Image (spheres, rainbow, N blue to C red):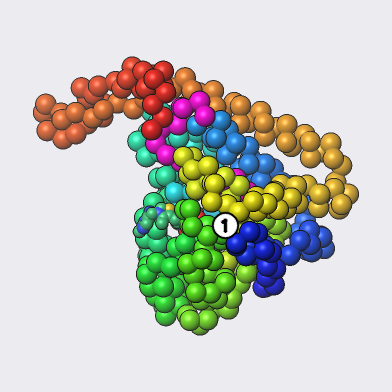
Amino acid sequence: MTLPLERHAYGEHEVVMPPQDPTRFDDASIDLDTRLAMFRLLHRLRKFEKRAYDLFMQQLVKGTSHLSLGMEAIATGFGTAMREDDYTFATYRGHAHTLARGVPMEPVLAELLGRANGLLGGKGGSMHLTSVEHGVMGSYAIIGAHLTIANGAAWSAQYRDSGQVAVCFFGDGTTNIGAFHEALNYAAVFKLPVVFVCENNLYMEYTAIADITAVPRPAADRAAAYGLEPVLVDGNDVDACYLAADAALSRARSGDGPVLVEALTYRHGGHSRADPGKYKPPGELEAWLAYDPVNVYRDRLERLGTDPTRLDDIEADVVREVDEATEAPRQARCPTRPRPSPTSGRMEATHGATDLSRSCRARDRAGDGA
Ligand SMILES: Cc1ncc(C[n+]2csc(CCOP(=O)(O)OP(=O)(O)O)c2C)c(N)n1
Ligand SMILES: [Mg+2]
């Protein structure tokens, strides 16, 4: 399944966009229940990220954070197609991929706020979201490192003959780092059940990927070097992502080896919360906003005859869910600081620990969101 490129000139840059044909997947054989579930998930991811942004602005989020506003169709399609016991490996831009595996919003929001009821007890933060019970095997801040770790999980699944697949998400910039090439080669040689998903959002930090990459499709154009088919999908179309995920997962699960998928998309915001994205050429954001995954999907469902009030009800439900999920984290205390136990000498969080709640609240008041 490949997608032809369309090139658009924006100032000094040339930008690659999916061809604007939102009706392309109208006839895909995806049942309505699955599509409505994906519509809900898409909105959950979008509204969660917006809430995270609002909490940044209130200086309640500890540490930095990287949003995937505009990129949610990929996590929606892959998260829906994955089997419950499959593995996810994410980058620091991993809120959506974590939620898409069924991790509830509240502990994720609490983690962003650095609270004791967070997914990692408030000590990991936005960049390290992990939930082994949901198959989320970590969010990694070292570019490319997790591709080789995903190979390890896939190798374990192959050894145990468990039928599990490791799905590893990473960015376009990651394709220019050594670990990407090592991991692809290794997975291909050993036919590992791993799906590598490059979320090509056109930028690595503040640099346009096209300016520093030898080929126009950073992942797909390298697939042949590892004996793989190039797979380029429209990362703003939920159905395209779901179908690509389904095909890739089936191949990997059946023992035919890895798949490398490149999903073309765009991040609406800057690289991290500190980045206003001023390097983006004029008109580029507007062009992509006109092809926003949330609107593309709602329009499709309406074209296919879904009652708009049914879609409105789902959106209203999601708003309630996000509001409820924000309440407890706001009120929660910060983690305790571990101290050496007087008897064992080991660091213990509960015995003789210092409650950091007061300093945590003081930081909130002082607006120290780091
Ligand atoms: C090994 C390593 N080198 C450099 C960095 C600094 N760094 C952080 S994010 C980033 C850009 C990554 O871009 P991309 O892979 O496209 O992911 P995106 O942020 O667009 O999701 C870089 C170079 C890092 N985290 N790790
Ligand atoms: Mg990128």
Q: Is residue 264 visible?
A: no
Quarter holding residue 240: bottom right
Q: Does the magenta stretch include residue 260?
A: no
Amino acid carrying label 1: it is: Asn
Q: Does the magenta stretch include residue 60?
A: yes
Vertical position of residue 153 compared to residue 251: above or below: above
Range shown magenta: 57-72
Vertical position of residue 250 compared to residue 72: above or below: below
- Classify mark 1: helix, strand or loop: loop
For this rendering, which residue is in front, 290 or 234? Answer: 290
Task: Decide if ligand 2 comes within 8 Å of the CB at mark 1.
Answer: yes
For this rendering, which residue is in front, 349 or 174? Answer: 174
**Ligand 1 quadrant assignment:** bottom left
Residue at screen point 51% across, 66% down: 211
What kind of secondary structure does the magenta stretch mostly adopt?
Answer: loop
Taking 184 as reference, is 3 left or right? right
Query: Residue 346, percent across and down?
Result: 16, 35
Q: Which residue lies furthest to the front in this view?
A: 12
Query: Residue 250, percent across and down?
Result: 60, 69
Q: Quadrant of the C terminus?
A: top left
Q: Can residue 140 be seen in this view?
A: yes
Residue at screen point 39% across, 67% down: 177
Query: Residue 167, percent across and down?
Result: 50, 61
Q: To which residue does mark 1 refer? A: 201
Q: Quadrant of the N terminus?
A: bottom right
